Amino acid sequence: MARIFKSLGSVLAIATTIILASGGTAKAQETEEPTRYQPFAEEFNRAFRRGSGDYFRNRQLVEQVGDFLGIPSFPDQAISQDNKNINRLYRELMDEQFNSTPIIRTPDLPSPYDSSIMTTPAPGTDRPGFGGN
C-alpha cells in the first residue's frame, strides 16, 4: 500500500511540474489585455468612498478609535476630501465630454410669436377701477 502512495505521489509531482511549466510558457504568448471601460457611476462611487469609506468599514473598533484620534484624518476632513475628489472628477469628465467634439452651432428656430408680454399693456388699465374711479 505504501508503494502505491509513493508511486502515486511521484506521478502527481511530475504532472504538477509539467502543468506549471506549460502554464509559464503560455503566459509569454498571451497578448496584452484590452483596457476595460469604466462607467462614470463606478468612478464616482469610488471617489465618493475613497477617504471616508463606507458604513461597514467605519464601524470597526480600529476605525472608530482612529476617527476619535484623527488618524489618518477626522471624519469631517475625510468627507471634505471625498467632496473635493468628486468635484475634480466631475470637472475632468465634463472637460473630456465637451472638449472631445467640436462645438455644433445651429440657428434658432423661428418664433411664432411676434410680441412680448413686456410690451403688452397691463390688464385692466382701460377699464375703470372699483367704485367708478
Image: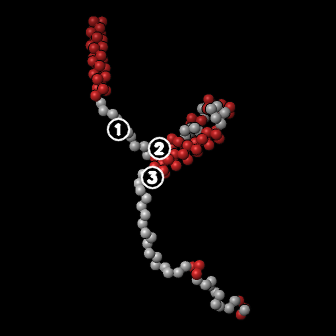
Between the C-alphas of marks 1 and 3, the distance is 25 Å
Residue farthest to the bottom, as pictured = 132
Q: How is the image coloured?
A: secondary structure
Task: Write the residue at 51% across / 45% down.
Answer: 89
Instruction: Give the labeled residue for mark 2.
Output: 42
Position of 132 compared to 4: left or right?
right
Number of other residues with Cα within 10 Å of mark 2, as a class: few under 14, some 14 to 19, many 20 or more: few
| Any part of residue 1 in sight | no
Q: Decide: marks 1, 3 in contact (CB < 8 A)? A: no
Out of 40 and 121, give the one closest to the viewer: 121
Position of 7 compared to 99: left or right?
left
Task: Write the residue at 46% across / 76% down.
Answer: 111
Position of residue 39 measured from the top left corner of the image (x, y, whole percent): 43, 46
Helix, strand or loop at mark 2: helix
Helix, strand or loop at mark 3: helix
Q: Earlier in the sequence, mark 2 or mark 1?
A: 1
Between the C-alphas of marks 2 and 1, the distance is 19 Å
Task: Write the residue at 62% across / 32% down.
Answer: 72
Q: In the rendered structure, which amino acid carries the disc numbered 3?
A: Asn
Between the C-alphas of marks 3 and 2, the distance is 22 Å
Label number found at residue 99: 3
Number of other residues with Cα within 10 Å of mark 3, as a class: few under 14, some 14 to 19, many 20 or more: few
Q: In the rendered structure, which amino acid carries the disc numbered 2?
A: Glu
Instruction: Give the labeled residue for mark 1.
Output: 34
From the viewer's perspective, is residue 25 above or below residue 57?
above
Out of 49 and 4, give the one closest to the viewer: 49
